[in-house]
Amino acid sequence: MKRIKFISNIALAGLMALGATSCEDWLTIYPQNKVVEEQFWEDKNDLEGVRYHAYVQTSNNISKFILWGDLRSDSYVQNTSLTGGITTRERYRKIIEAQPDTTMDCFDWGGVYSAIVFCNKVLAKGEEVLKNDAQFASSEWQAMKAEVIGLRALNYFYLLRAFKDIPFTTQAITSDADVKIFPLVNQLTVLDTLIADVESVKGKARNRFTTKHDTKGLITNTALYALLSDMYLWRSALREGRNKDSVWWEDDARKAIEYSQKSINELARQENQAAASYGASVSKTEDYNLGASYQIYNCNMIANPDLTQNYNNKQPSISVPSYQAIFGGDGKDSGNSSESIFEMQYSQEDNRSNSAPGSYWDYRSESSQLSVSKNAILQIYGSNEKKMAEDSRTWYSCNSWVTSENSEKTAPGMMKYFNCNFQLNNGRIYTAPSSTPYANWIFYRLTDVMLIQAEAYALLNTNDGFKKCRAIVDAIHKRSTVGEVAAEFSGSTRDQYIKLVMNERQIELLGEGKRWFDLVRWAERKGGGTNPDPREPQYTDGSEGVKLMVKEFMNNTYSSMESTLTNRIKNRYGLYCPIYEKERQASEYKIDQNPVWNREKES
């Protein structure tokens, strides 16, 4: 891919000029006109500098990760009160209505490949630096190697979930002469390689770093296990959707259970070690009868007093919301909670801000591109508004909020990433959220991994699996509802338990870039159809899964568009993004367009 500027001597010079703001001063600055490959890789500081910029480049892609992983889902509608950003609104409308344009730069994957470039370079030069730097221990390199393989796999995992078949290489590009066109590789083939790569280094990364900032902001063993559980769950869906008679997908489901538990156990160990070594404070947690490793925040935060003040004779109360500890965006003390597994770091102190959440959701009606779909959220509670109001998570999503005693507005988005000062006055809850753009972006946290495990248990279609699935979902649901009300559920089939997990993921992980990927995984698992797959004719094209996904989930928000969405998405390829036209031009059209979106001219 000629557009994707794989790292060369010139790129290294630019890299060195950037400098670093890491707490460990990872970059050594050389005069730009002196930088060449042979002079660069002298000690571990050089290696750590490039490793650091792999993280920086990953952080620069958050806005696209949100768009690829969430925008098209049933969780949102467009904000009709928007007064600016009309061009963006029209672009989002087309994407939501399954009419993407291949000229839209939001489908430019170059930034993600830039992060991969940095990772490949670190992995290619690690052994050389180990020989050159006597102070660089082999154990340090092995831990860094595991960390960077994990970060590379995470970036590739986003690409294959967003685009399906993608260009793939682990080759480090040293000069412009090495740049070549990498053709598309089958999604499942890439995923097999990523899983094998991370399997080869599992348990070899660091368990934690010297600061909480780095422990939560860099890839650790608990993050590697979380990533493995997620990738195995995705692969189980691909395998089941293509060959329902194969037992391979069941093996993947069991692996997802195994590695989600390893991640949970490792997180518990990480937190205990941190508390013992540098006095980390741990907020009040409960295990909800799941075991000591499942310590999650006691999170009965806030409920709507107009609907719930007489529920079980409880009066509404105000406390410091646990969600604020998890998602707080003041760039200082919030974020990096005990539940966090891996999150990208932003802070005013480091002059690194995160404007991505605010560009999609903002508490100000004139600024938000997206509103949370109340219809989609309400169906989780059986269309019972009282039950919905009893769930404190809805205060960060689709309930009303009050800026003063007499000024009530409808929240156009969700307030997870904005500092919400909830207060109680004359029996009414009100808040004045502030738009501080320093909220960390969470890739994985405890409840996400728990729900990966719950879905995998449901897949096994056993009574024991159903019991464990229900216990996990109830624990997560219970901690955020008034009176610790468990999720209402009377299902008995595999599909019903999977949908129970999907519902809980929708409200628990709302706005975290997960929902569309969850729907794609669901549709891929269903598979089916009468026509052959456009690229793999030995399989069907997955059109039945698309139809069912639209009917079962998208109808909650877009009921009037059921037939339109089904016809436009067509088959499994319509679940994925088109390839940016300029990428195809740069490849001299050797990179094939997604067959559903193959509408642009090739000249």
Image (spheres, rainbow, N blue to C red):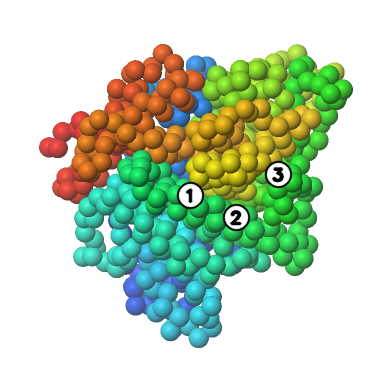
Amino acid type at circle 3 is: Ala
x and y, in percent, of residue 132 in the image? 43, 83
Q: In what element is the residue under mark 2?
A: helix
The residue identified by callout 3 is 325
Residue type highlighted by circle 2: Gln
Residue at the image point whose x is 25% and y is 50% from the top: 184
Residue at point 42%, 22% (across, down)? 551
- Measuring from the top left, give residue 354's x and y in whole percent: 54, 43
Image marks 3 and 1: residues in contact by CB distance under 8 Å: no
Query: 597 or 92: nearer the eye?
Result: 597
Amino acid marked by disc 1: Ala
Question: Which of the pair 500/439 is nearer the observer?
Answer: 500
Gap in Å between the C-alphas at discs 3 and 2? 24 Å
Label 2: which residue? 261
Visible in this render: residue 48?
no
> Are the two marked residues, 3 and 2, in contact with CB atoms closer than 8 angstroms?
no
Q: Residue furthest front?
A: 463
Q: Is residue 100 left or right of residue 267?
A: left
Nearer the N terminus, badge 2 or badge 1? 1
